[in-house]
Image (tube, coloured by chain):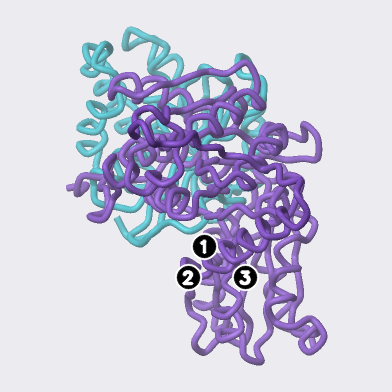
Amino acid sequence: MNDGRILIKGNEAVAYGALDAGCRCYFGYPITPQNEIPEAMSRLLPENGGQFVQAESELAASAMLLGAGSCGIPAMTSSSSCGIALMQESLSYMAGSQIPGVIVNMMRGGPGLGDIGPSQGDYFQAVKGGGNGDHRNFVLAPSTAQECYDFMFRAFRLAFTFANPVMVLGDAIVAQIKEGVRRQPPEDALTSDDYAALSAAWRLEGYGRRGSAAKPRLLKSVYLAEGALAERNVLLMRKYEAMRAHVAWEEWQCEDAELIVVAFGSVARIARSAVRQLREQGSRVGLFRPITLFPFPEAALRRVSRDRRLLVMEQNTGQMVEDVRLALDVLARRSTVSWHGIMPGMFIGADDLVEPILTALRED
Amino acid sequence: MSGYQDVIMAGFGGQGVMLIGNLLAQSGLEQGLEVSFIPVYGAEMRGGTANCTVVMDTHPVGSPLVNRPMSSIILNEPSLHKFQPRLREDGVQIVNASLVSRDLLDARKRTVYIPVNDMAHELGNVKMANVVALGAWLRATGALEPDVVKQAMHSVVNAHYAKLIPANIKALEAGYTFAA
């Protein structure tokens, strides 16, 4: 009757998705609201020949991720907000050294220790790099437990395709929600041979294994010679540009909408309920959901928005709204983009979003 | 069941609201519905209040959280204070008469006032109070057939505790009958 779906949390779906996508190593340190990820991984990986390490700190866990990635091993870590902040050193080094890895951030309130409720306060940190230097993470934002499972396949593929950190950016809601999830790997899921092939040109494996003529390989982020770092960063910039080919988004009820809500992750699914409610009452509103936050679906948003009013809804004091305004050219279209913020730690329902949408709809 | 249904279940940590929330969500899933279950608890667990929200729908669940629920299961007084004002005017609440004073009930809200602790105790185990309350909720809302929930117990309960299922079926039936 339930067509094979299992009732699991978003966190558990992340763990199953990672395992099924070929993840071999997990390194992490406990923190609410993502603890079911390490809990599940501590069982799943050893049972399937992988390695689970509870590290002594988030910094250590992220350094282990760098180490595993440099050997071409599909590996991941997960944490929440303040824990992810501690990992930024390694993420920057991974980006600079072109080392793949998957990082899951189930956001909680901040700044600092904040609270354990839902928040989207790490948007800037995730999409603008987060660590030092001019680097970017590829960022995917799931809004359902099913997407928590499905996006892990995308995350590992992208990490190895671009040799770059990939962040899956969820929050306390999508982490803790239980929904029916179909544990069905996509047909094009990468195999261990695929990962080996994608990392063959650079991974560290002991150069003696590549024959007597082989030279040692070096993965590094330090380029001190004149012009060397510039050359490196131009290469990285071109790589970030190439990521645009993998941009993803969802449009819902946008065709005839007078106002389009722009929201990601958990807020997007709640906004969908609000939009549905308002549609039933005759309001012409729609929903645009960025699925990749970096790269941001700028072209799609420009096409969808035309001259229509946009309302950005996010659980922070105004972060994604900046990317929306940039996408639409802030000078030309300032008046058509309004914004509604939701403070961290609040558990909001559709009712909370209905009135702000109506207000924006009435705005002149 | 017609379309959309939501419920907030609340009580002290340890009263088993998470278990019956899971059970109801699993039942909905096995009925072929779209479901969501989301727990809300503070950093403190034991003795504190815990609540969860279950949403069932015929199309994918948007908001897993609701401010004004269609129904609620209230197992202690603090939960009544928090959620009775939020219950929709046309909603129904299942209130634990063993722990909540009748004086606190809002006469304008449809209420099934049921002594779930005492009933569970008579059935042999006070820990089944949560399941008695779920039985009453099934009758009061007509959301799902009890048989679906009885079947789902096998999916939710760890094999180690499967021997407790027959007693819990009796508890579910007792609550269902009471609410008739």
User: Chain B: what color?
Assistant: cyan
Image quarter for residue A16? top left
Q: Is residue B26 left or right of residue A25?
A: left
Q: Earlier in the sequence, mark 2 or mark 3?
A: 2
- A355 shown above or below B5: below
Q: Secondary structure at mark 2?
A: helix
Where does the image place residue A294, in percent across and percent down from the top left? 60, 61
Of B179 and A97, nearer the camera is A97
Say if B62 sits above or below A199 in the image: below
Of the residues under marks 1 and 3, which one precedes in the sequence? 3
- The verdict on a common chain for dots 1 and 3 is yes
Residue with the mark numbered 2 = A245
Q: Identify which amino acid the numbered label 2 is placed on.
A: Ala
Q: Nearer the viewer, mark 2 or mark 3?
A: 2
Q: Amino acid at mark 1?
A: Ile
- Is residue A259 visible in the rendered image? The answer is yes
> Whole-Å distance between the Cαs marked 2 and 3?
21 Å
Residue A291 is tagged as 1
User: Label 1: chain?
Assistant: A
